[in-house]
């Protein structure tokens, strides 16, 4: 029974969500609309689980002076300060009754002054990593790699004004070789075709995986072995 | 060390330094590049132009602070265009981080550049709603079930521009600026396809290729990355010359993008020269 | 399994009676039907596809074997674990950034189960930093069961699977820190990823780790292909669990998926032919037939 209960719950939930998509009214439709609310509520409670685990893991590292315990200290200080400042709405003109994020609150300061620059910095790392990955990966080893390399260069140049400057002198009969036009053609045709093919394959993969899970054929995610 | 080996073993920190220089230096010397809107971006501009004054537009800022440098210029350009045309703009987001972006656009663009525009009559902040496609689905049937009040707590029925709005179908167009899920794809699938509402928008350069299959049947147009934003700004400056005096963030940021793209292309070519020389040497051996 | 399905259907009908009809009391005219006819074509496709997949599952159960092509990334999983054991370095597993409501995360959990069993046998160290609390619970249960079934319950360390942060780049920064400090010999990125995919992959590359990635997010595939040793493209991520387990019913479902793809190809070819014919001839009958075919899929 302990093995079967999760499978029954999975099957019922799966069938309700599939059938509820096609049913316009009645209890099934109500259930279909309710399940996504239930999931949202469960994930909110799951925050407590995650937060608790975070505190436990890092406090243990600090207490045992384990490897890199100082980083755990930074984590705990950041976590605690943000939690207290946000929960008690410190600095917010409206006090405890104010909105979660008020322009003059300390939480807004943490968001604008610490969180936003840090998130933007991490995202900005992509620029450096794109360059190093391109330098390493775009080598004309095979025919396919050469096509990839040429397409990448066309897109890199064509998606900037310099592409137009480099090939703008071409006569109208050869305007199809204009870098921006070539870049747009690659995006609109081969890229779109490839994206659609991958999307269809993924959709079918999702359907097959979902059916395996709903019908209990695939059970590893439950931690159960067949 | 021989040249091909040196190229093969090029320390990635040298690449990082070159990229840093290629981004930082143009920010100092501020090169300007002329740009023009490609058809896929021009379609968005033309749709905004063709709508009669007073049209209700839903502008969904479905992104957070990490992608704001790429998507904020689009939001600013769209707001500037919409308000100049006399449209009424409802700002909304499906991302929790998006609330901060809405506040920024409202404070730095709408209130700063259009102080005569009234909150509730010309623009409104509908805030954030969780649920992605599910939320859009509900808003398609009954908007006020999902959003009974705006982000400041005022009932939508008390706001002049939203009093007679029943569902998303009462908007002339939905514009979504997206950095991922949920975003433009969900708006197309749940509002555009099912409700027949025109949907258009913009996405980061990474997300935009995934959205091209929806153009032009299911999506009016799309701005892809900073280039797309720059194209829209150039269309705006062409149509409204008074906007040339304003700071156009995407146009300014195109300088670093152009230089860094050229540097990357040169690095790729250099890497291939080294690879080909090494291959030639090993064939000779 | 049949008994479970039957019991579930009985419970479903019972639940139907328990929940109130939220639409009762509204002005429902006689014309309002239970079924959304706008979604009829989708319903038909769902029935057909489900039927095909279940037919192949049943065929596999009865002993029929199917050919599945080799997937390079999955063939090297054991090699990656062996490499880590020899070097005395840990293995990093990143199950993606989405929650358990994403099929990619469930597929990743299935793969984690298989990998954990191999790791338990090789006595390597596994780190699984997660972005969502529910994923942490599921991953712990999965890995624990894998260690149990490998006969190594003593080797299981609960704290090696831990929650980091819900914020995307905070999580990315933390995982990057683990990669740079712990220097894993093998990194697995399997699940749903966004902009951080290249950041993770390049950081792993900088420490010389063997990297196997897989995602069904098309925009992230090029980054993984460029930076990782092996990449599972889209549906290969969903096929991975069936591929590794070699369980006949799961392999049968892969075949059903392939039939679905064949049907899609046929319809694409028919659509292309119709549109080409319409453009070439301008024939009204062809044009009307083409419009009708398009309407079928709206």
Image (cartoon, coloured by chain):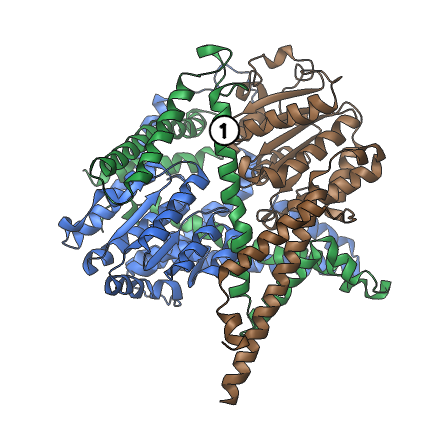
For mark 1, give the secondary structure.
Answer: helix
Q: Which chain's residue wears label 1?
A: A
Q: Which chain is blue?
A: C
| In this view, B46 is above or below B93 | below
Near-viewer residue (C105 or C119): C119
Say whether residue B217 is visible: no
How far across and down, in percent of the image, does residue B44 sit? 73, 39
Q: Which chain is brown?
A: B
- The residue at 39%/52% (across/down) is C190
Near-viewer residue (A156 or C33): A156
Q: Residues within 10 Å of mark 1 (few under 14, many from 20)?
A: some
- The residue at 49%/46% (across/down) is C194
| In this view, B218 is above or below B284 | above
How far across and down, in percent of the image, does residue C152 sit? 15, 53
In which quadrant of the rendered image does the C terminus of chain C lie?
top right
Reading the image, the residue beneath label 1 is A111
Q: Colour of chain A?
A: green
Say whether residue A17 is visible: yes
């Amino acid at each position: 029974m302990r093995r079967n209960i999760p499978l029954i719950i999975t099957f019922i939930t799966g069938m309700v969500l599939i059938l509820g998509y096609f049913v316009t009214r009645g209890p099934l439709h109500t259930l279909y609309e309710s399940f996504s609310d239930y999931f949202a509520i469960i994930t909110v409670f799951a925050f407590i689980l995650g937060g608790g685990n975070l505190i436990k893991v890092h406090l243990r590292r600090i207490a045992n002076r384990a490897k890199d315990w100082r980083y755990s200290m930074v984590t705990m200080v950041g976590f605690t300060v943000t939690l207290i400042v946000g929960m008690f709405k410190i600095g917010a003109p409206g006090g405890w009754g104010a909105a979660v994020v008020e322009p003059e609150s300390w939480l807004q300061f943490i968001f604008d002054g610490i969180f936003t620059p840090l998130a933007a910095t991490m995202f900005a790392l992509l620029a450096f990593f794109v360059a190093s990955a391109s330098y390493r990966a775009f080598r004309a080893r095979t025919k396919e790699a050469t096509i990839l390399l040429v397409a990448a260069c066309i897109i890199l140049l064509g998606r900037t004004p310099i592409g137009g400057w480099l090939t703008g002198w071409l006569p109208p009969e050869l305007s199809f070789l204009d870098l921006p036009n070539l870049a747009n053609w690659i995006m609109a045709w081969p890229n779109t075709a490839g994206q659609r093919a991958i999307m269809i394959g993924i959709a079918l993969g999702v359907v097959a995986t979902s059916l395996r899970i709903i019908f209990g054929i695939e059970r590893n995610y439950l931690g159960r072995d067949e | 060390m021989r040249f091909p080996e040196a190229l093969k073993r090029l320390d990635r920190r040298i690449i990082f330094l070159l990229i840093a220089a290629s981004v930082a230096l143009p920010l100092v010397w501020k090169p300007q590049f002329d740009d023009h809107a490609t058809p896929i971006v021009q379609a968005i501009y033309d749709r905004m132009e063709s709508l009669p004054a007073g049209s209700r537009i839903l502008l969904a800022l479905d992104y957070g602070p990490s992608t704001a440098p790429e998507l904020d210029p689009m939001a600013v350009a769209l707001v500037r265009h919409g308000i100049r045309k006399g449209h009424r703009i409802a700002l909304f987001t499906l991302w929790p981080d998006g609330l901060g972006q809405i506040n920024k656009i409202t404070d730095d663009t709408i209130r700063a550049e259009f102080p005569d525009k009234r909150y509730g009559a010309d623009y409104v902040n509908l805030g954030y709603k969780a649920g992605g496609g599910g939320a859009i689905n509900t808003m398609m049937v009954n908007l006020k079930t999902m959003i009974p009040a705006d982000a400041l707590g005022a009932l939508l029925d008390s706001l002049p521009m939203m009093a007679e709005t029943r569902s998303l179908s009462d908007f002339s167009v939905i514009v979504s600026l997206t950095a991922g899920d949920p975003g433009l794809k969900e708006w197309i699938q749940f509002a555009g396809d099912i409700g027949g509402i025109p949907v258009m928008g913009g996405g980061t350069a990474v997300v935009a290729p995934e959205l091209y299959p929806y153009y032009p049947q299911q999506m009016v147009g799309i701005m892809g990355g900073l280039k797309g934003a720059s194209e829209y700004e150039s269309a705006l400056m062409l149509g409204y010359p008074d906007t040339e005096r304003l700071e156009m963030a995407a146009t300014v940021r195109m300088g670093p993008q152009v230089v860094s793209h050229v540097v990357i292309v040169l690095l790729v070519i250099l890497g291939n020269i080294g690879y080909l020389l090494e291959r030639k040497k090993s064939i000779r051996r | 399994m049949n008994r479970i399905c039957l019991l579930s259907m009985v419970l479903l009908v019972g639940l139907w009676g328990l929940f109130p009809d939220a639409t009762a009391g509204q002005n429902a005219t006689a014309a309002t039907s239970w079924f959304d006819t706008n979604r009829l074509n989708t319903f038909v496709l769902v029935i057909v596809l489900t039927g095909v997949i279940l037919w192949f599952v049943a065929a596999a159960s009865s002993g029929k074997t199917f050919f599945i092509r080799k997937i390079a990334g999955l063939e090297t999983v054991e090699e990656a674990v062996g490499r880590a054991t020899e070097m005395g370095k840990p293995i990093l597993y990143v199950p993606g950034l989405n929650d358990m409501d994403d099929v990619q995360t469930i597929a990743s959990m299935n793969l984690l189960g298989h990998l954990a069993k191999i790791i338990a046998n090789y006595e390597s160290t596994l780190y699984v930093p997660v972005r969502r609390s529910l994923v942490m619970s599921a991953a712990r249960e999965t890995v624990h069961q894998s260690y149990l079934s490998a006969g190594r319950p003593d080797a299981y360390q609960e704290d090696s699977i831990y929650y980091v942060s819900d914020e995307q780049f905070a999580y990315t920064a933390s995982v990057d820190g683990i990669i740079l400090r712990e220097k894993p010999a093998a990194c697995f990125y399997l699940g749903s990823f966004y902009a951080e995919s290249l950041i993770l992959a390049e950081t792993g590359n900088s420490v010389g780790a063997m990297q196997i990635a897989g995602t069904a997010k098309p925009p992230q595939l090029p980054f993984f292909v460029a930076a990782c040793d092996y990449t599972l493209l889209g549906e290969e991520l969903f096929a991975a669990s069936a591929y590794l387990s070699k369980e006949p019913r799961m392999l049968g479902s892969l075949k059903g998926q392939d039939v679905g793809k064949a049907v899609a190809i046929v319809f694409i070819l028919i659509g292309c032919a119709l549109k080409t014919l319409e453009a070439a001839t301008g024939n009204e009958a062809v044009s009307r037939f083409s419009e009708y075919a398009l309407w079928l899929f709206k």
